[in-house]
């Protein structure tokens, strides 16, 4: 079960938020640290989040075609 931490980008959908999760990787040739990010559609039942909030999300069974994560707490 994956637990990720990310920033809320969008709250426009009903019971769904878009969360961007950043990670840092080293470039294979130049050895520089690069930031990579991925967006996840996340299930949010209680609807108390705002854009810019930091949240912890956890992987679940598929809720819809795109949603496989849910919010467990606001940081």
Image: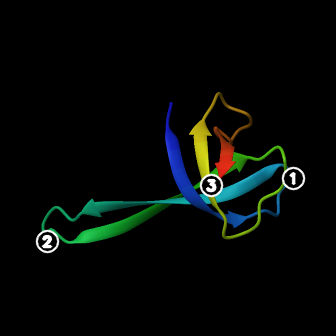
Height in image: 70 above or below 14? above
**For residue 70, what is the image quadrant?**
top right
Give the CA separation, mark 2 to mark 1.
43 Å
Mark sitting earlier along the chain (2/1) = 1
Tag in front: 3 or 2: 3
Mark 3–mark 2 Cα distance, whole angstroms, equals 32 Å
Q: Residue at 68% of width from left, 45% of height from top?
A: 71
* Residue 6 placement, left or right of 37: right
58 with respect to 49 (left or right)? left
Tally of numbered discs: 3
Mark positioned earlier in the residue sequence (3 or 2): 2
Mark 1 in CB contact with mark 3 (< 8 angstroms): no
Residue 30 vs 23, above or below: the answer is below
Please rate how many residues cluster around mark 1, counting C-alpha atoms within 10 Å: few if below 14, some from 14 to 19, many from 20. few
Element type at mark 3:
strand
Q: Residue furthest front?
A: 75
Residue 20: x %, y % from top left: 57, 61
Where does the image place residue 40, in percent across and percent down from the top left? 60, 52
Which residue in the structure is indicated by mark 2?
A: 30
Residue 12 found in image quarter: bottom right
Please state which of residues 21 and 73 is positioned toward the viewer in this rendering: 73
Q: Residues within 10 Å of mark 3 (few under 14, many from 20)?
A: some
Task: Say what secondary structure mark 1 lies in.
Answer: loop
Binning the other alpha carbons within 10 Å of mark 2 as few (below 14), some (14 to 19) or many (20 upward) gives few
Q: Are marks 3 and 2 in contact (CB under 8 Å)?
A: no
Q: According to the image, label 3 marks what residue?
A: 55
**Secondary structure beneath disc 2?**
loop
| 1 vs 3, front mark | 3
- Which residue corresponds to mark 1? 14
Which callout, 1 or 3, points at the residue further toward the start of the chain?
1
């Amino acid at each position: 079960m994956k637990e990720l931490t990310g920033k809320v980008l969008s709250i426009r959908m009903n019971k769904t938020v878009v969360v961007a999760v950043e990670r840092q990787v080293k470039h294979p040739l130049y050895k520089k640290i690069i930031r990579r990010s991925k967006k996840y559609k996340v299930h949010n039942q209680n609807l108390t989040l705002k854009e810019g909030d930091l949240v912890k999300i956890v992987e679940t069974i598929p809720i819809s075609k795109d949603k496989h994560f849910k919010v467990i707490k606001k940081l």
